Amino acid sequence: MSDTAGTPLLRARGLRKEYGKGEGRVRAVDEVDLDVGAGETVAIMGPSGCGKSTLLHLLGGLDRPSRGEVSLNGRRIDDIGEKALARLRRTAVGFVFQSFHLMEELTAVENVELSALLAGRSPRAARRRAEELLEQVGLAGRARFLPSALSGGQRQRVAVARALSNEPLVVLADEPTGNLDSAATLDVLRLFEGLHEAGQTLVIVTHDVRIAATADRMISMRDGVLVDETRLTGGTTGRLGALAGLGD
Ligand SMILES: Nc1ncnc2c1ncn2[C@@H]1O[C@H](COP(=O)(O)OP(=O)(O)O)[C@@H](O)[C@H]1O
Ligand SMILES: [Mg+2]
């Protein structure tokens, strides 16, 4: 499951994650090798319980592998200390979750701003960045709303803005449209397409074929293993790299 163009932005080798001990042991991720090139969008699909979330958490340093290596931008992240790992999550990775995970007591703009502050921006720069991002996701008019006053689709757009607030090397999205209706799914879909065209590296776990169809590559996962890969050759500008790679 490798990409050929240069050093991959995100690289996993022999990645394994086990939960529990003895009889009850579960191997959630089993010897996964994965390369994601800069600017690539990769979709991961597979049945519930096959290890997609676990893999995403390992790739973004939310969890540590039992075995194997993960590198981001050429640097190992599986064996670094807790502090360095926390810093990496704040500054280099953007996460989008199925259930949004917004801070309910903060407004939309404050949710995004907090993330920018944690990444090290000054208060003024963080506010400016948050306002810009909310505009980018079409929510400038909702900046002062609490999450409870927003629809599911709007909440997820705030969560995407938050994920972008630290200018992450990679955005990792775990079933981002899993809780959304069809219209809201299309909004989020367009957002990811825009990010893709702008060159943002994305790994999206999804059950939605429309979302997966925006990717450069679609990878199937079963029982902790990556079993199949399809390189897509659709029409957006972000796919030029994939088209160029067809000959290999
Ligand atoms: N924290 C955990 N403790 C024990 N088992 C877990 C934990 N997280 C996930 N699992 C198990 O690992 C397997 C993969 O889970 P998960 O990565 O959530 O799959 P998916 O996201 O594809 O639904 C499942 O069997 C699940 O029950
Ligand atoms: Mg999951």
Image (cartoon, helix red, strand yellow):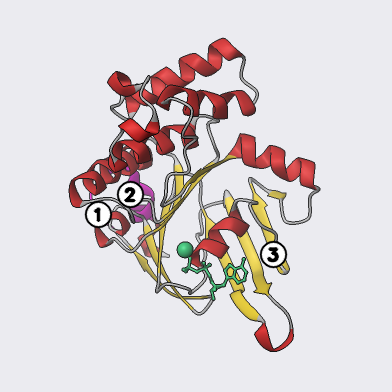
Is 21 situated above or below 70? Answer: below
Membership of 237 in magenta stretch = yes
Give me the disc on residue 89. none
- N-terminal of the two: label 1 or label 2? 1
For disc 2, the marked residue is 239
Total numbered labels placed on residues in the image:
3
Rendered residue at 59%/13% (across/down): 123
Magenta segment, prevailing SS (helix, strand or loop): helix
Which residue is located at x 46 percent, y 34 percent?
104
Out of 186 and 23, give the one closest to the viewer: 23
Q: Single out the mark in the foreground, 3 or 2.
A: 3
* Residue range highlighted in magenta: 233-244
**39 and 104: which one is in front?**
104
| Crowd class of label 2 (few under 14; some 14 to 19; many from 20; radius 10 Å) | many
Q: Residue at x 36, y 21 (%)?
A: 143
Q: Residues within 10 Å of mark 1 (few under 14, many from 20)?
A: some
In the figure, 176 relative to 161: above or below? below
Q: Amino acid at mark 1?
A: Gly
Q: Which residue is mark 3?
A: 65
Distance in Å between CA atoms under marks 1 and 3: 34 Å
Q: Are marks 1 and 2 in contact (CB under 8 Å)?
A: yes
Q: CA distance from mark 3 to mark 2?
A: 31 Å
Is residue 234 found left or right of 100 in the rendered image? left
Rendered location of residue 185, percent (x, y)? 25, 48
Q: Which residue is mark 1?
A: 234
Give the SS element for disc 3.
loop
For badge 3, the amino acid type reads Pro
Q: Residue furthest right?
A: 81
In percent of width and height, residue 61 lies at: 65, 51
Horizontal and vertical percent position of residue 203: 46, 53
